[in-house]
Image (cartoon, rainbow, N blue to C red):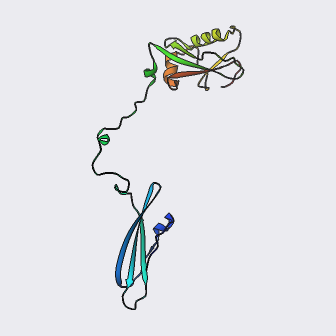
Amino acid sequence: MSASLPTNPAQLTANTAGGAQGTSERTTTTTTTGAATLAATVSTQRPTGGVSDTSATSSTLSPPEASELGLSASPSSSEHRSPRKKRVRTADDYIKNGKVILYFKAAGSAPRLIQNKFKMSVTNTFQAVIDSLRKHLELGSSASLFLFINSTFQPNPEERILDLFKCFQVNGRLVVNYCLDQAWG
């Protein structure tokens, strides 16, 4: 008598046992599907004499063996080295010669800058950024100009560039969104 292996993972928890006497045969089959390995053990009891046929089936999930994954017992030369961890760069890593990169993004109907990346000293206040952008956009002092950090908030003009950069830099740049009409906040 041959027993069939369950193909559905939900069937792998089924256990049926018989109480007949006879010789016992055990077969283990391993099936690899994607990343999961299913190991099914089928026990079949063969009747002796005139006793009716009964079979017991039990299936279990087991982790894949090293030989099934193609791993060798001896470590290769690449396994002797410890994996390198990427060091997370902090805001201080991006400050070079006391300057940081400001990235200007126009919003709404504001004119676009041809050059949108500028270096500015960390000792300046945000008022220096406002004055510099007014000069590049050729806006008068009476024209409205709204500046936002990361499209979120308007910093105080007395705020230092260093403090803003350390708190809100993204990939080594302080993103300053600007518009002529109130857009955020």
Q: Can residue 45 be seen from the camera position used here?
A: yes
The part of the image, by quadrant, that contains residue 131 is top right
**Residue 124 horizontal/vertical position (percent):** 52, 11
Which residue is drawn at the image coordinates 52% and 24% (left, top)?
Answer: 169
Which residue is drawn at the image coordinates 54% and 16% (left, top)?
Answer: 159
Q: Can residue 17 be seen from the camera position used here?
A: no
Quadrant where the C terminus sits is top right
The part of the image, by quadrant, that contains residue 180 is top right
Q: Is residue 154 left or right of residue 160?
A: right
**Residue 3 horizontal/vertical position (percent):** 45, 75
**Residue 31 horizontal/vertical position (percent):** 43, 62
In this view, 179 is above or below 65:
above
185, 90: nearer the viewer: 90
In this view, 123 is above or below 87:
above
**Residue 30 horizontal/vertical position (percent):** 41, 64
Which residue is drawn at the image coordinates 48% and 69% (left, top)?
Answer: 6
The part of the image, by quadrant, that contains residue 16 is bottom left
